[in-house]
Image (spheres, rainbow, N blue to C red):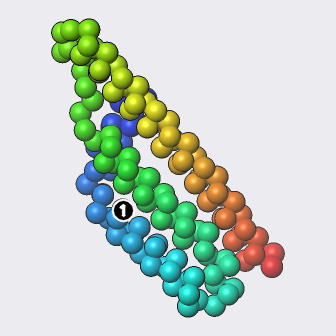
Amino acid sequence: MLRFYQRWAYRLYPLRTLILIIFVAATLSFGWMLFAAPVAVAEQWQLSVVLLAVTCLLLWLWATLFSRQLPSVEVATGFAEKLKLRLQYGIYYLLALLVTLMLLATAYLGLRALKGIIAALFFG
């Protein structure tokens, strides 16, 4: 699982600035919708913009956290070093699970928002 995250982090790493630009644009759009947009537009697109911002933050976090080289257990000589490296692996696994759960939650909410947008456009 960590190798999968590391491979995708290497692919996402060059796109970090683009992801941050999209995050800033989504945040500014949310601010506009909160204070200046018409109510109909804000109701329809506010959740989508928030989900885009959260997803961009998660992808940036993924690219930043998992782009580092994973520690190698074979290099460790003593018991304390092996224990330390295994704890680091455990923490990386917990971070990977947390990022996965948050991405699944945002994907679920994104699909719900998309369903609402499609329902409003075609059946409203």
- Residue type (three-letter) at the residue carrying disc 1: Ile
95 above or below 32?
A: above
Q: Quadrant of the N terminus?
A: top left
Question: Residue at 40% of width from left, 30% of height from top?
Answer: 91
Residue 65 percent location from the top left of the image: 33, 43
**Residue pushed farthest right?**
123
Question: Residue at 64% of width from left, 57% of height from top?
Answer: 109
Q: Nearer the viewer, residue 98 or 81?
A: 81
Question: Residue at 56% of width from left, 83% of height from top?
Answer: 33
Is residue 78 shown left or right of residue 96?
left
Q: Which residue is mark 1?
A: 19
Q: Quadrant of the C terminus?
A: bottom right
Residue 32 percent location from the top left of the image: 51, 85
Is residue 111 shown left or right of residue 6?
right
Residue 105 percent location from the top left of the image: 60, 50
Mark 1 burial class by Cα count in 10 Å: few <14, some 14-19, many 20+? many
The part of the image, by quadrant, that contains residue 9 is top left
Secondary structure category for the residue under label 1: helix
48 above or below 41?
A: above
Q: Across the whole image, how many numbered discs are drawn on residues?
A: 1
Residue 41 percent location from the top left of the image: 64, 84
